[in-house]
Image: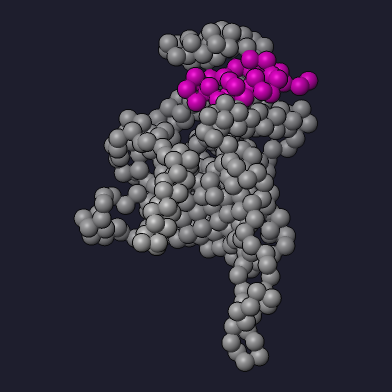
Amino acid sequence: MTVKRVVVCGAGFGQIYLAGVALSGLELIGILSRGSAHSRAQARRWGVPLYTSVRDLPGDVELACVVVRSEVFGGPGSELARELLARGVHVLQEQPVHADDLAKTLRVARKHGVSYRVNPFYAYLPAVRRFIRAARALARLRRLSFVDAMGAVQVSYPLVDVLGRALGGLRPWVFCEPPEMPDELATRGTGEVPFRSLHGLIGGLPLTLRVQNQLHPGDPDNHAHLLHRIAIGSDGGVLTLADTHGPVLWTPRTHVPREDSGNLALDGRAVSDAGTVILGPQQPPGFARLLDETWPDGVRVALEELIAAIDQRADLGAVDQYALATSAAWQELTRTLGPANPLRPSTPRPLPGTELLAEIDRLAEIDRTNECA
């Protein structure tokens, strides 16, 4: 029988899951939280009971979304997941999860005959799904040659996951120690260098990785310069995920042939007219739409995938092994990077693109005026 009755554990980022459950058509029958004013407000908003203990949950709960920090960040999320699994409840747990913790939780799930899955979250967003599909298509057409990636340490687990999905696997992976940052960069520049750079391998391909290894102790979910940016190179061109939410770009490789004389044939008729193309929507969604629609819909996709596997009694062995590899690779990456540097900046002021375009136009007008003077 199809799973229908769901509880969401956690009312912080759990708000996204609550909206995702609503989109999925599943029946939300409660919120499990510590009983804060915020969680009580969420229970009122969704018209469901608020529970503060697994023992208090109704006996007909079939699936739980655990959106509580896991043990790797000092939270009770994984212990809560195991308690629910032991009650015969399927569990979808928000990333990240430590590899040893994950293996322990998978054993509990198998013992009690229920399904458990870590939700990498970003892999289910439209632009990332498009990028992963495009990378797999590219690998069928051309030889992949390198990976260049950027990201924030807060979302480094899903970065590893996306790379593995795009490349068809993570093994072999190697993360080399990043070079020491010369003091001169900080003393002569405008401040601390935000990104640490390292080289390595991912899926056997050469990797260049830059991670903003900084966290605000009082606000760890904010202050990232970006979430993810990934480029996968091939002998035919470069596939780029410009941002976690798009666009996805394809840039054919530039090659200018030589004439019989040995000189470059610098004539448009001698080369392909192919240029960079956007694969998918031209304009990524704004952040308000991301929170209200795109992110909840990603949760819907993750839920539907898990429920389909439950209904089909699918063998999740390969899925479990990939999850364990993702967690192990992520742990190795974070060990290599070292502890995140504390960051206490002021609240950022995001610059709308319309303001930037207006300033560009003003500068263009100034340049035209100066040219005529």
The relative height of residue 78 versus residue 372 in the rendered view (above or below) is above
Residue 284, quarter of picture: top right
Q: Is residue 172 visible?
A: no
Q: Position of residue 363 (x, y in %)?
A: 40, 52
Q: Position of residue 258 (x, y in %)?
A: 63, 84
Q: Residue at x 62, y 9 (%)?
A: 58
Residue 363 is inside the magenta segment? no
Residue 20, quarter of picture: top right
Q: Quadrant for the C terminus, please.
A: bottom left
Q: Residue at x 64, y 30 (%)?
A: 297
The relative height of residue 188 versus residue 32 in the rendered view (above or below) is below
Q: Quadrant for the N terminus, please.
A: top right
What span is colored magenta in the figure?
1-28
* Left or right of 145, for residue 304: right
Residue 180, quarter of picture: bottom left
Residue in front for this viewpoint, 352 or 184: 352
